[in-house]
Image: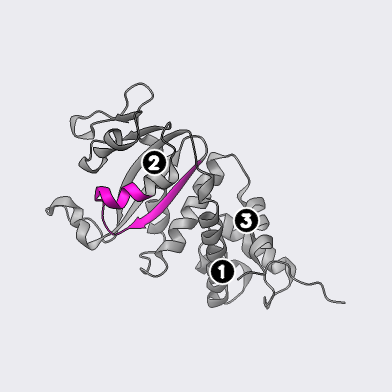
Amino acid sequence: MTTKNPYRKWAKHNRQKTIWIIKLFCEDITANKASNLLWIRRSTINSRYNYFREVIYWHCENERKEIRNWIFELDESYFWPTRVRWKRWRWAWMKTIVFGLLKRNWKVYTEIVPNCKADTLRKIIRWKIEPDSEINTDWRRWYNWLVDIWYDKHYRVHHGKNEFVRWNQHVNWIESFWSFTKRRLNKFNGVTKRKFPLHLKESEFRFNTRIQNKNIYNELKKILKKYVKKI
């Protein structure tokens, strides 16, 4: 009697090979290196990796309502293409804009946005954060409305004046997430626009697992067993 593979119903490999693919994915080994280590075609490894990313994406999206009262850091970041130093604003009109909310000591949530206008960010912030939460941002003009509308505990640091920390007021955690994500994406020598949301949510999942001191392999196995019948 053959043993079924609980991680993917239509997997071509046995259970042990699938577990090794999951472990290499958790160690952030690229598909090319994993293919050489396991003697499996690179296209097959990419297929499994994309499947894991899809599961992580839906897991992160379904967990987003858990973020409530706490101390938050808000910031935005621009992804691709490479910065051209003599152009102002980092060619923001060509890049993908990502807005992030980080709940200190717990998790980060990211969302791709078309722009950083107040109307765009207001919908995300008001839906994710309760009015009595503490919010930390930089000095960007699109955060000016926070105190006027809903949030009394709004603290800001002025990076343009070399101010990065004022007591417990800073955005260093969310900045570390942007740095972590961009370092990861550099390994792939570019990511297509269609797959960028999957890689973004994968970085979010890895960062949140690390913050909460959880084992990424155990966490990924849990969500794979949870979503295996739905994808």
- Residue 186: x %, y % from top left: 37, 58
Task: Look at the image and give the residue range highlighted in magenta.
Answer: 107-123
Mark 1, secondary structure of its residue: helix
Q: In this view, does 5 lie to the left or right of 214?
A: right
Residue 171 x/y as whole percent: 35, 35
Of the image marks 3 and 1, the number of the one nearer the N terminus: 1
Judged from this view, the residue extending furthest toward the right is 1
Badge 2 or badge 3: first in the primary sequence:
2
The CA distance from mark 2 to mark 1 is 27 Å
Location of mark 3 (residue): 220
Magenta-span inclusion, residue 117: yes
| Residue 51 x %, y % | 56, 69
Q: Is residue 68 visible?
A: yes
- In the image, residue 133 sits, relative to residue 95, either above or below, namely above
Q: Name the residue under label 1.
A: 51
For residue 178, say whether it is visible. Answer: no
Q: Nearer the viewer, residue 200 or 38?
A: 200
For the image shown, how many numbered marks are present on the structure?
Answer: 3
The type of colouring in the image is one colour
Secondary-structure class at tag 3? helix
Give yes or no for contact between labels 2 and 3 (Cβ–Cβ under 8 Å). no
Q: Amino acid type of disc 2?
A: Ile
In the image shown, does 54 or 132 lie closer to the viewer?
Answer: 132
Cα–Cα gap, marks 3 and 1: 12 Å
Above or below, 145 relative to 124:
above
Amino acid residing under circle 1 = Tyr
| Mark 2–mark 1 CB contact (< 8 Å) | no
Residue ID at (34%, 36%): 150
